[in-house]
Image: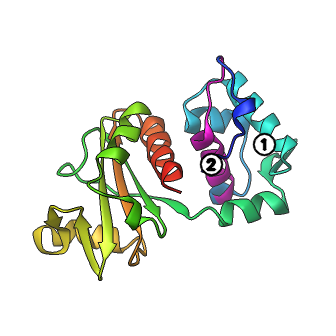
């Protein structure tokens, strides 16, 4: 799924679709946000954040005022209809890196074969790696390898607490930077849509 039209991305752009989604997620969680906060959350410079916000304003997804950046009604609608969700998760057994990000992706389990394609997308986006779990027939599975419900019930419980359903995918992405973990997880999810 592409959020930013390719014509908007030139050689000097420091943001991508994952950053646009992360702006929307930040607004959703906070009600409004500032450019300063977005610099920290996105892990990109203030100029890139300013440009990204201007692009999102031109789509009429966000609006700005002295009190911050917030959704338009259309922006809230767009965000709520992207079938992905960032979730807190951690496991040193399934991901490498000090910072890990969980991601729930609705209805795309049929797009996962062994999880390597998704891991590769994560690595291309700066992560140390990614593990992919699917829910099939009520069981959480590390594709074609492990029944997580049997082998690691505690972690299966973490995944189940996200609201995962049959046909959904859960990603666990790790890196040594929190912004990188988030952006890589979102990049994998958007690529699966």
Precedes in sequence: disc 1 or disc 2:
2
- Residue 150 lies, in percent from the top left, at 12, 74
Q: Are marks 1 and 2 in contact (CB under 8 Å)?
A: no
| Residue for badge 2 | 21
Label drawn at residue 56: 1
- Residue 161 lies, in percent from the top left, at 37, 73
Residue 126 visible, this angle: no
Using residue 57 as the reference point, say whether residue 13 is left or right of it: left
Vertical arrangement, residue 28 with respect to residue 16, above or below:
below
Residue 22 falls within the magenta-colored stretch: yes
Q: At x 57% / y 34%, what residue is drawn?
A: 40
Label 2 CA crowd tier, 10 Å (few <14, some 14–19, many 20+)? many
Residue 174 falls within the magenta-colored stretch: no
Using residue 128 as the reference point, say whether residue 92 is left or right of it: left
Q: Which of 76 and 65 is in front in this view?
A: 76
Outermost residue on the top side: it is 12
Q: At x 40% / y 73%, what residue is drawn?
A: 167
Span highlighted in magenta in the image? 12-28
Secondary-structure class at tag 2:
helix
Please tell me whether the stretch drawn in magenta is mainly helix, strand or loop.
helix
- Residue 185 lies, in percent from the top left, at 44, 47
Label 1 CA crowd tier, 10 Å (few <14, some 14–19, many 20+)? many
Q: At x 50% / y 48%, what residue is drawn?
A: 191
Q: Nearer the viewer, residue 24 or 136?
A: 136
């Amino acid at each position: 799924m592409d959020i930013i039209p390719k014509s908007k991305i030139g050689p000097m752009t420091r943001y991508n679709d994952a950053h646009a989604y992360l702006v929307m997620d930040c607004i959703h969680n906070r009600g409004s946000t500032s450019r300063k906060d977005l610099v920290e959350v996105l892990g990109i410079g203030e100029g890139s954040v300013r440009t990204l916000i201007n692009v999102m304003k031109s789509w009429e997804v966000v609006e700005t005022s002295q009190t911050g950046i917030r959704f338009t009604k259309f922006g809230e609608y767009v965000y709520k209809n992207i079938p992905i969700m960032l979730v807190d998760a951690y496991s040193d057994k399934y991901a490498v890196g000090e910072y890990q990000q969980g991601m729930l992706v609705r209805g795309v389990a049929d797009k996962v074969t062994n999880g390597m394609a998704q891991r590769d997308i994560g690595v291309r986006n700066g992560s140390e790696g990614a593990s992919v779990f699917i829910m099939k027939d009520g069981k959480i599975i590390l594709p074609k390898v492990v029944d997580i419900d049997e082998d690691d019930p505690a972690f299966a419980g973490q995944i189940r607490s996200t609201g995962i359903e049959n046909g959904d995918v859960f990603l666990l992405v790790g890196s040594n930077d929190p912004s990188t973990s988030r952006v890589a997880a979102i990049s994998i999810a958007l690529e699966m849509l």
